[in-house]
Amino acid sequence: MSLKQPEKIRVDFDSLEPYGQTAEELYSYEGKLFSGYAVYDYFPNSTDIEFEKEFKNGRGIGWENTYHSNGQLAEEILCVYATTLEFKEYDVNGNLTRSGRVVSETDYLDMVERYKLLD
């Protein structure tokens, strides 16, 4: 399996805990605001990741990745909370089949800089 950003920590989403008493959804891992990937789904009878979501300082900000059963990236979506900024879809061989930006170039660049999305 060739994971996107393999150097980042990955934990089961069920290992995260709500953090604080605010309306904002924040998550912690081992008592600290979580930064890394939370794994939501695995392929049946496997430890291979099917879907994961990136968190930065406890917030669901960054990449949401879906993988094909052969380990190739199937889709990557760059999000800030529930707002999609851009997406890319790949076939089972890793070839880009579709992509696009959902927000203006100005908004995209602002969000990337403000939230350090590509770090």
Image (tube, rainbow, N blue to C red):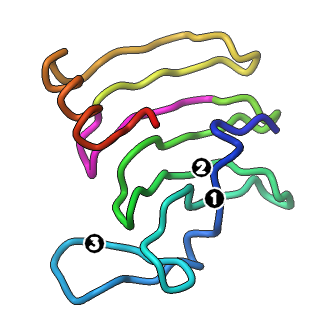
What's the amino acid at mark 3? Glu
Say which residue label 3 marks. Answer: 25
Please report whichever mark, 2 or 1, sits nearer to the chain's N-terminal start.
Answer: 1
Q: Which residue is found at the position 29% from the left and 32% from the top?
A: 112
What's the amino acid at mark 1? Asp
Say which residue label 2 marks. Answer: 51
- From the viewer's perspective, tell me whether residue 45 is left or right of residue 86: right
Where is residue 79 drawn, in percent x and y?
Answer: 33, 41
Extreme-right residue of the structure:
45
- From the viewer's perspective, tell me whether residue 104 is left or right of residue 88: left
Q: Which residue is found at the position 56% from the left and 55% from the top?
A: 37
**CA distance separating discs 3 and 1:** 20 Å
Residue 86, disc: none
Residue 41, disc: 1
- Mark 3 in CB contact with mark 1 (< 8 angstroms): no
**CA distance separating discs 3 and 2:** 20 Å
Where is residue 10 drawn, in percent x and y?
Answer: 65, 59
- Pick whichever, 89 or 24, lies toward us: 24
Q: Which residue is found at the position 69% from the left and 46% from the top?
A: 7
Read off the magenta span.
74-84
